Amino acid sequence: MARTIKIFLPIKLKLVTLLLLITNSVLFAQESHLKIEFNPVFNKEILAKNSWYVSRNNDSLQFLKIKFYVTDFKILTKDGNTKSIPNSNFLIEVFNDEKLNILLENVSYKKGDQLLFNIGVEEKMNTSGALSGSLDPANGMYWSWQSGYINFKIEGKSPSCNTRKNKFQFHIGGYQQPFAATRSLTLDFSTTKNKVLIIDLEMATLFNTISLNTLNQVMIPGKEAIQIADIIPSLFSLNE
């Protein structure tokens, strides 16, 4: 009897281990993810730090810093259901290759579904006290408890700017009405090939709209910040 037990237990353990491996493999196979790559351009030319570009308004300009928040991602299915993606708050830094890509984990979606997210930080996160990670004030994207987060930061220089060292600075934010500057964006899943979504960020769209000779410094919430915030969603489009 004792010999039978010694032989039986290892076999049973092997079967249990095999079942666990199969179960884990099935669960892993059911999990999905979505990688998003942001592709910054100016008139469809790859955007490079300190390179010169010319807008439709004949403003020559170069960019020194571009940072922005994308937050609160959701999947809207074809049948109208909305699936929130937890902890989906990211700080994108255009001139830092490591911070141009994000990964949304455990996301299921199909062709025809839509991806929804915010450009900027919504009110509840502005009023939640000190946060960590991408929302840490140490990232240089936070004014104060009263003004909140900077949603989109653009800094550079242009001869058109009658400012110190010809600099332009657009720090676009604000969460209190009537100057709430967070904007939402919806993109269609035209394909799920490779599970990679490339989103172009066309900076010319903004600088073809404004003239740096007259508008080159926006540093607080207000009417001018709202003017730019309303343009920002049009900078984003799917690279297809």
Image: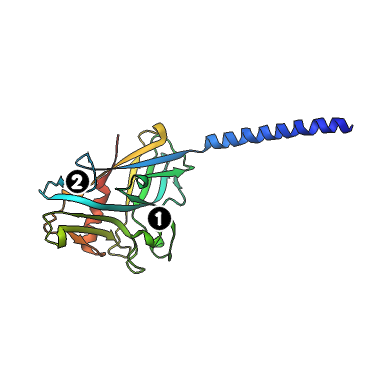
User: Residue 155: which disc?
Assistant: none
Toward the viewer: 130 or 158?
A: 158
* In front of the other: 165 or 67: 165
The local secondary structure at tag 2 comes to loop
Kindly identify which numbered label has been placed on residue 51.
Answer: 2
User: Mark 1: few, some, or many residues within 10 Å (few <14, many ≥20)?
Assistant: some
Q: Quadrant of residue 28?
A: top right
In the rendered image, residue 7, in percent from the top left (x then y), is placed at 81, 30
Answer left or right for 18 relative to 211: right
According to the picture, the residue beneath numbered tag 1 turns out to be 134
Pick the front one: 33 or 175: 33
- Residue 7 is left or right of residue 88, and the answer is right
Side (left or right) of 11 relative to 66:
right
Q: CA distance from mark 2 to mark 1?
A: 28 Å
Give the x, y percent position of residue 137.
38, 62
- Placement of the C terminus among the 4 image quadrants: top left
Q: Secondary structure at mark 1?
A: helix
Residue 124 lies, with reference to residue 204, above or below; the image says below
The residue located at (43%, 61%) in the rendering is 131
Is there CB contact under 8 Å for labels 2 and 1?
no
Q: Residue at x 14, y 55 (%)?
A: 212
Location of residue 165 in the rendering, given as x and y in whole percent from the top left corner: 15, 60
Of the 4 image quadrants, the one containing the N terminus is top right
Query: Which tag, 2 or 1, sits closer to the chain's start?
Result: 2
Residue type for callout 1: Ser
Q: Quadrant of residue 19?
A: top right
Mark in the foreground, 2 or 1: 2
Q: Residues within 10 Å of mark 2 (few under 14, many from 20)?
A: few
- Residue extending furthest toward the bottom: 146
At horizontal 83% and vertical 33% (from top left) the residue drawn is 6
* Number of numbered discs: 2
Kind of residue at disc 2: Ser
